[in-house]
Amino acid sequence: MKTLEVDLGHRSYPIHIGSQLLSNSDLLKPHIQGKSVVIVTNETVAPLYLGTLKTQLSNYRCDSIVLKDGEAHKNLETLNTIYTRLLEQRYDRKTTLIALGGGVVGDIAGYAAASYQRGIPFIQIPTTLLAQVDSSVGGKTAVNHPLGKNMIGAFYQPQCVLADTEVLKTLPPRELAAGLAEVIKYGLLGDREFLLWVKDNMDALKDCDNATLTTAIERSCQMKAEIVAADEREGGQRALLNLGHTFGHAIETEMGYGEWLHGEAVGAGMVMAAEMSRACGWIKQEDLDLAKEVIAAADLPTQPPSKMTPDTFLQHMARDKKVIDGSLRLVLLKALGHAVVTADFDQAALMATLERE
Ligand code: NAD
Ligand code: GLY
């Protein structure tokens, strides 16, 4: 097992990574303050892993709330069902909420924990690769509003994160690939050597080899933990974690959520960011080719859907959270393994990228 720390002073917390962690109660118990625990999960994950987790918590009053599966349920209505259950069962402020699931469950349960009785302790047990390398770390919690994704939320850090690689074996291959997009993202934005390691170990990653996954998750979480420790509330460098996301969000929004998985859109979006960095003259052709090769090897798309025109991209990109005073900022590559957030780019390079020249 590997253990990292997210260094946030008195709110610091460990990330444990390895196989069979779900059946190791010693990792959880130090982070449970009171006598009560409520597990929030969903109808897909519950039959697979809820029983194992509950067995570890037999010394506590332990309840579970099983949500419907899917992004469509990441909303205020679902959040309210969690509040209602907690209130009906008279759960107090010492109750620990545990999120057992992918990023959807983690984001909803995290915001429920942040807001129930002004904040109760919270533990993340992410069960998708995307959640293990990204959403469970760093304290962003949210639900969607009909007018926008992740628009109601809070920064609220967990007490600990427990990433068990064994649970990834039941993930559908498309979901595993979507998580690999985020792993590749860390290599592209900050560590060329890691990108090459991911390329060389792609088969083992896709086969869910525990040791290889542990290394990939550890390096990804290490990079995320460093960025979050330096910029928890995204005043600056945390935006680097959005490499490929401005193009990717445009694809997701235009296609309708669910048609393309987030990670798939980010895969194509990262290729576009690399193409634009090449068009700006910042990275070499061989770097662009390498980025594409790794993304394709993960079974991710390397180009946007054909229905995306420059106009549809520009319309969606104008609504990006990184737009400040009307000026579009993008995460681009000054070199492979060195990303920057910048509004200082050649407009012609952007248009050439969107026109797929
Ligand atoms: P998800 O939570 O919808 O999970 C994907 C699918 O896999 C679901 O059907 C789920 O039920 C299923 N599943 C989960 N674990 C499984 C397992 N071990 N075996 C079999 N099936 C399993 O999607 P996701 O990709 O994990 O997360 C996406 C969400 O994360 C989005 O809502 C996004 O906004 C959010 N997100 C948040 C952050 C953050 O920093 N908070 C970062 C990135 C993404
Ligand atoms: N997923 C981006 C972030 O946590 O900031």
Image (cartoon, rainbow, N blue to C red):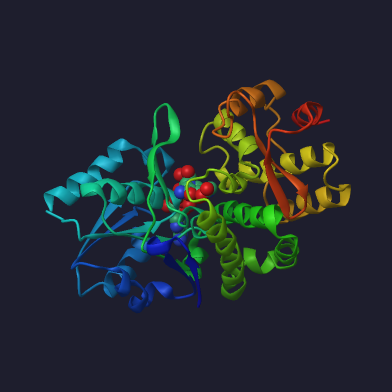
Check the image and report above or below for 267 versus 137. above
Check the image and report above or below for 350 versus 6. above
* Residue 298 visible in the picture: no
- Residue 254: x and y in percent read 58, 28
* Residue 219 visible in the picture: yes
Q: Is residue 80 left or right of residue 297?
A: left
- Residue at 62% across, 36% down: 246
**Quadrant in the rendering for residue 126:** bottom left
Q: Is residue 301 left or right of residue 235?
A: right
- Residue 65: x and y in percent read 26, 53
Check the image and report above or below for 348 versus 272. above
Between 124 and 241, the one nearer to me in the picture: 241
Check the image and report above or below for 92 versus 331. below
- Residue 51: x and y in percent read 30, 68
Work out which quarter of the rendered image holds the C terminus and state it.
Answer: top right
Between 327 and 243, the one nearer to me in the picture: 327
Q: Is residue 104 left or right of residue 180?
A: left
- Residue 257: x and y in percent read 51, 35
- Residue at 74% across, 46% down: 333
Between 10 and 299, the one nearer to me in the picture: 10
- In the rendered picture of this protein, how many numbered marks are placed on residues? 0
Q: Is residue 63 left or right of residue 41?
A: left
**Quadrant in the rendering for residue 54:** bottom left
- Residue at 67% across, 37% down: 330
